[in-house]
Amino acid sequence: MSEPRKGQRRCVKCERNRAERFFAPRGKTCADCRKQSRSKTTHDRRVQVTYGLGPGEYEELFNAQGRVCAICGQTRRTRLDVDHDHITGLVRGLCCRLCNRKLLPAARNSPTVLRSAAGYLEDPPALKFLGPRYHIENREE
Ligand SMILES: [Zn+2]
Ligand SMILES: [Zn+2]
C-alpha cells in the first residue's frame, strides 16, 4: 500500500488514499465509509425497533444464512428483508425483496401452495396430458 500523496489522507477503514475533501477536519475515515457505517447503524436500529432484534442480530442471522436469501439463495446488492409472519409476528428469516414481497404473498405464505408449485413445475400436467407443446412469446430483438 503506497503512502498518501500530498493533499491526501489514508482512510483507516477502507485503507484507500483519498483527497482531503473526503475527510472531516481531523477525521480518520473517509466520507463513503462514514456514510456506510451510519446507514448500517440506522438499519440495525430500525430492525431492532420493528422486529425486536437485538443489536447486531441482523448481521448474525445474515451470516448464519450464508449471506444469501433464505429462499432463493441469491445474493443481491440491496439488503435482505426481515421476513415475518404478519399474523403471529414471528420473525422467520432474511429474504430478498422478490421472495419476501412477491413469492411469499403470491403463495399466500402457504407451504402447501409452494410444495404444489414445485410439483407442478417438475411434473407439468399439460406435458402429461397433451404431450410437448411449445409457445414462446414473439420477441422483437
Ligand atoms: Zn474509507
Ligand atoms: Zn430470494
Image (cartoon, rainbow, N blue to C red):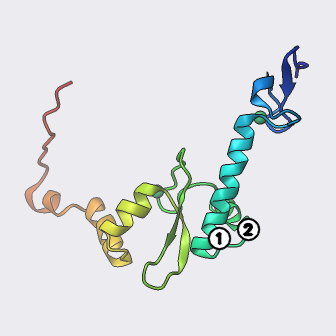
Work out which quarter of the rendered image holds the N terminus and state it. Answer: top right
Residue at the (77%, 34%) spot, across then down? 30
From what the image shows, is residue 101 above or below residue 134?
below
Give the image location of residue 89, x and y in percent.
50, 81
Asked which quadrant contains residue 103, the reply is bottom left
Q: Classify mark 2: residues with Cα within 10 Å, few (<14), some (14-19) or many (20+).
A: few
Residue 93's disc is none
Camera-nearest residue between 22 and 54: 22
Disc 1 target residue: 48
From what the image shows, is residue 65 above or below residue 109?
above
In the image, taking residue 95 as reference, residue 27 lies left or right, namely right
* Ligand 1 visible in quadrant: top right
Give the image location of residue 120, x and y in percent.
26, 65
In the image, taking residue 44 as reference, residue 88 lies left or right, namely left
Gap in angstroms between the C-alphas marked 2 and 1: 7 Å
Asked which quadrant contains residue 108, the reply is bottom left
Determine whether the beta carbon of the residue marked 2 sits less than 8 angstroms from the nearest atom of ligand 1: no
For the residue marked with disc 1, what is the amino acid?
Answer: Gln
Between discs 2 and 1, the one toward the N terminus: 1
Residue at the (67%, 64%) spot, across then down? 45
